[in-house]
Structure formats: structure tokens, C-alpha cells
Amino acid sequence: MTFIMVIELLIVLLALWVGSRYGSLALGAISGIGLAILVFGFGLKPGSPPTDVIYIIIAAVTCAGILQASGGMNWLIQVAERLLRKHPDRITILAPLCTFFLTVLVGTGHVVYTLMPIICDIALKKGIRPERPCGVASIASQVGITCSPIAAAVVAFVTISSANHFDITIPQVLMVTIPACICGLLAASAASYHRGLDLDKDQKFQQKLKDPVQYNYIYGNNATTLDKEIDPNAKRAVYIFFAALAIIVIFAVCQGILPSYDEVQVVKGGPDSITLASGVSETAKQLASAGVVVSGVTEHVSKHLKMNLVIQIIMISAAALMIMCCKASPKKAVGGAVWQSGMVAVVAIYGIAWLADTYFGNYMKEMQDMLGGMVESYPWSIAIAFFLVSVLINSQGAVVVAMLPLAYKLNIDGWVLLGVLPSVYGYFFIPNYPSDIATVNFDRSGTTVIGKYLLNHSFMMPGMISVVVSTIVAYGLSYVFHTFFALY
């Protein structure tokens, strides 16, 4: 690794670190400064922004935002609350499962803000230390991202994998990630079950109760959504949303039923394989893109409609149906937390992925020489890189878009990368993510904390256990499916 490479890498890392400190849109925007320095200052050839992934995220977030505007998410929260209040003594296990599946269904972890104060309220009334369910429930809300059929991380994994000749469908990804992540969350819940002192033995908590103001603050509120009447239109919107998800999954499993179209592409092993320096490869690509058929250079092929387009069409159509049939307000959707957080993710992925693709694209040979031996002997070690990058980037989708192309160019098998997919969640390590901060504020008992030394916080233990166990289980499942069932 040359001195210039190190300096440029430090610029990339500094841009990510500064962006994460400002948060929100700054993560993607400040990545643009890093990109400008690399391109204009060091003369690197700019990479390509991940437009396909961004378009899918926009479609999915629009649909989920319209669902929230219709009131449909309020109904889902009510269903979850009824389950939790029916079994309050199992809140430490059921709460993370509820936040997990909410994220799986809607593709973003930001839907849990309404549920988190309810979890705290149930725990307090049952005499359970709120840190136990709240800490792992916040982790679970982010873990569900790699298990959602419309989440950016899953869509990006499938799209990038297909471009690198690892043909895999969304259901096949979920067959690995969902059971693996549930195992990780159950392990984290078990470790949290008797975490910390019981409230009646916690002297600091008992001291608070002696103050009437503090006592009223802790026990005087009653967080619930059960007193809200759900409009029939909201329920109808949920049915439309679920139907859209089901259609996407069906098309992903049975891609043969999708429409097919004739395309012109470069003949495999023909002129496109000649070095770019000769100019023949670029010419062949230009001919193919123009629809020109030249003997020995291009040919007609029939291809089914790509899944990235299928997802966009169905999600946008579902959003339109909810607007027309369920009286969902587009203006209300734009002002909602789901749509806003989704657009922030789009900007983050846009900036971060473009910055990373520019750096790695210019130094791919050096990266292969430097990391090739290690990943050849221990291909699973790429999980460590995914995790460390995620500590800096508060977006699992951005980690996938930024790092997965590099992993494929290092010749790591697709099934290995699928097996380590849960490792892209590492931003709990530094507790600055909105869901973690909100959880601390929602816990009126003060037991869910960000520690004095920053890293000794309430999310570290459940987060590490969940990610490690999930990655190990996912790696094992992916190996079994690949070796014994030849699913991909």
C-alpha cells in the first residue's frame, strides 16, 4: 500500500467519520467532499453511483410512507401492543420479536418509535427492569433490515450479486437471514433476561422513587395505542401493502412467469473479452446498447423483466392504490418519519457508495494483492470488514453497496457473502443512532443508558451477541444450502 493510497483512504474514513458526527443528510453530503478531493485533488477516476439500488429504495420508501400516512402502521403497532400486554412477563423475549417483524414488514427500523414507550410502560408495570427488553428491542429493530424483502440492504445484495454472476433471489436471501437473525435475537434476549439489578434491589432506582415528582414521572404516564380507533381505510392499506409484498416474493420465486423481452448483448467470450486498451470491448458495448446486431460481436437474447424493475413497479403501484382507495394523504406521507428517514438513507447511500466505489475502483489490483491471500484462506473474515465499516456508516444498505462489489472482486464466493450478511449491522457500537438515543429517552426509569465511557452502554451486549450469533448461523445455513441443496 503506497503512501498516496493511505492518504486517500484516510480522506475516505475522515469523510465518513465527520458525516456520522453530523448525522442525517450530512453523511451522504460530506462524502461528496471526500469524493471531490479524490477526483479533483488526486486525479482519481470517479466511480458510479448505485442508481438501481437508489431507485428501488425510493419506490419502497414511498410505499411505506404512504402506508404510514394511511394509519396502517398504527394498526400494526396496536396488534403488537396487544400481544405484549397479553404476556407482560415475557416482554424481554416478545418485545424484540415484535420490533424485528415490524421492520421486516415495512423495511425500516424507524417504525418502532411508537412501540418503544409501550415496551417500557409494560416492563415498569410488571416490575421488570426496562433496560432488559428495551436494549434488545432497539437492536432487533435494526437487525430486521437484512430480513426485509423491501429493505435497501437486501435489495442491494440481490442486485449487486446478480451483476457479479451470483444469481440469487430475495426469498433465498430471507431463507438464510430470517432464521439466523431470530437465533441471534433469542440469544441476546436470553442474555438480557436477568441483566442488571431487579428494580426492587436497584438502590439508585429506589432513591428516585422517594421523590414524588420522579415517582409521578416514572409511573404516572400510561403509554398505549389501544385507545385509538383504527379507520377501516388504514386496515385496507395494510392489506394492499401485504399483497404487494406477496406479489414481489411470488415473482422472485417464479421469475419464469415474468414478461420477457429481446435484447442485444455482446457475445460471451467474443470481442468483449478483449482488453479495453484495444477499444474493441467498448465498441461492442456501444453496439449492444444501440441495439445493433453484428455477427460475432453481438446477438439477440430473450431476457425476463429484471426483479429490480418488478419491485419498483409494484411498490409504486401499491402506493398509488393506497392513495386512491384508502384516502392516504401524500402530503402527510412526505412529513412522516418513514419517508423522511428513507430519503436520508438514499442520500447516504448515494454519497457513501460513490465515494467508496471511486477509491476501491482505482486501487482494485492493489486491494486484491493485499487482501487476496487472507480472504482466500479465510473468506469469512470479510465479515469483520463489513462490521467495522458499519461502525462508521449508520446504514446497512450503504455498507452493502459500498463493500459488496469489492468483496466480489476479491473472488469471494457469493454463498460466503450471503452467510456474513448479518455482519453489516455494527452502528450500535457507538450509540449515536436515532433509535438507540430515542430508547434511552423513552425509558423513564433511567435504566437504559449511554455509559460514562461511551462504549459501556445498554446496547453493546445484546448487539454483539445478536450480530455474532446471527452471522455464525447464517454462514452455516448458507453453506448447507449451497453444498447439499444446490439452491444457488
Image (cartoon, grey):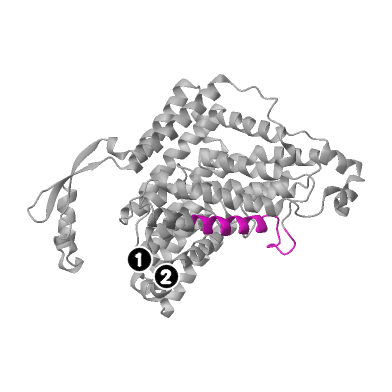
State whether the magenta stretch is mostly helix, strand or loop: helix
Q: Is residue 6 left or right of residue 136?
A: left
For mark 2, give the secondary structure: helix
Identity, as a three-letter code, of the amino acid under mark 1: Asn
Image quadrant in which the N terminus is located: bottom left
Q: Which residue is mark 2?
A: 375
* Percent position of residue 276, x then y: 20, 66
* In front of the other: 380 or 109: 380
Q: Is residue 112 above or below residue 389?
A: above
* Percent position of residue 170, x then y: 41, 45
The answer to whether the residues at label 1 and label 2 have Cβ atoms under 8 Å apart is yes
Point out the stretch of residues depicted in magenta: 451-474
* Percent position of residue 320, x then y: 42, 27
Residue 411, disc: 1
Q: Residues within 10 Å of mark 2 (few under 14, many from 20)?
A: some
Q: Residues within 10 Å of mark 1 (few under 14, many from 20)?
A: few
* Percent position of residue 428, x then y: 61, 56
- Asked whether residue 399 appears in the rendered view, the answer is no
Q: Earlier in the sequence, mark 1 or mark 2?
A: 2
Does the stretch in magenta take in 254?
A: no
- Asked whether residue 16 appears in the rendered view, the answer is yes
* In front of the other: 320 or 103: 103
* In front of the other: 293 or 348: 293
C-alpha span from label 1 to label 2: 8 Å
Name the residue at 46% across, 46% down. 174
Residue 171, disc: none
Identity, as a three-letter code, of the amino acid under mark 2: Val
